[in-house]
Image (spheres, grey):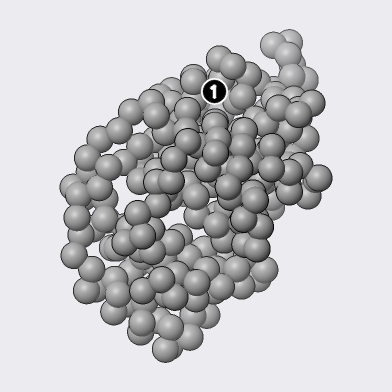
Amino acid sequence: MSWNLVDTVVLDVESERGRCVIKAAGRANHHIGREITAHHTVTECLVRTGHAAALVEYDRSANLLVTRYLDGSLVMGSEAEFDCETYRQAGVLLRRLHDQAHRVDTGWEAAAVAKSLAWLGKPNRISESVLASVQEILVLHRPQPVVVVPTHGDWQPRNWLVDQGTVKVIDFGRFDWRPAMSDFCRLAARQWKGNAALEHAFLAGYGSEPRDPEQWRLIALHEAIGTAVWAYQVGDEPFENEGHRMIANALDLF
């Protein structure tokens, strides 16, 4: 059940406690810990309605967690991936996740800039001219306080299931408190490209448009940088190429 890009193993097992999913990873992998935190703090609003899996057991020190198996098939690669109703439901679920709480974070933007600059310091295939442009934008940016909410971090069809027409959510391994619009990045870079109907359906479900243009362009740039560099490090060339396209698209917003 895993994507075989990092050291995470995902198993579908039958047990005396029913059908479960076991996730385990190496000590350097932070995704399991993030997912455990998500299950303890923010997933109940989705679990109680059957839209996310319930936590069964976990061990932070072993980087392991067990959840209930969630019925459904992956949206990515299916007809549901380009069905407006899928996106309307996904928007509703994301708003439910985001609306649980919010707070003002005075350090989020500065930390995001520092993280992007650190990514750019790692081996990558970003051209020198693009690298110079990106670094200039980041260095000149003056961080401001932002409102952050509980975010999924990878909200897209590869982490959605559809079960008899009902959309469900999996994999909270990138959970963190971020600006709400950050959960729009993957969709904007992929499924919404050239398909405004899907975007409109999602926004109808979400209930509003959270993307302030000034903040959105910087968040899109952060996401693009992380995508391009991380994908190069793990050898995922198609994803790396997507990251380069995302960088170009983000730069067009400045």
Q: Which quadrant of the rendered structure holds the C terminus?
A: bottom left
Q: Please report the residue visible at 31 percent of the width from the left and 61 percent of the height from the top.
A: 214
Q: Position of residue 239 (x, y in %)?
A: 62, 65
- Give the number of callouts: 1
Q: Position of residue 174 (x, y in %)?
A: 48, 44
Q: Please report the residue visible at 35 percent of the width from the left and 46 percent of the height from the top.
A: 179
Q: Please report the residue visible at 52 percent of the width from the left and 68 percent of the height from the top.
A: 246
Q: Nearer the viewer, residue 37 or 98?
A: 98
Q: Is residue 88 left or right of residue 99?
A: right
Residue designated by label 1: 46
Q: Please report the residue visible at 73 percent of the width from the left and 14 percent of the height from the top.
A: 18
Q: Tell me the element at label 1.
A: helix
Q: Is residue 82 visible?
A: yes
Q: Nearer the viewer, residue 119 or 139?
A: 139
Q: Nearer the viewer, residue 75 or 135?
A: 75
Using the image, determine if residue 15 lies above or below residue 207.
above
Q: Which picture quadrant has residue 137?
A: bottom left
Q: Callout 1, which amino acid?
A: Leu
Q: Position of residue 36 (x, y in %)?
A: 47, 30
Q: Which quadrant of the rendered structure holds the N terminus?
A: top right
Using the image, determine if residue 185 lies above or below residue 34.
below
Q: Position of residue 188 (x, y in %)?
A: 55, 57
Q: Is residue 110 left or right of residue 252?
A: left
Q: Is residue 38 visible?
A: no
Local packing at callout 1 (Cα closer than 10 Å; few below 14, some 14-19, many 20+) is some
Q: Is residue 118 left or right of residue 75?
A: left
Which residue reaches farthest top? 16
Q: Nearer the viewer, residue 80 or 66?
A: 80
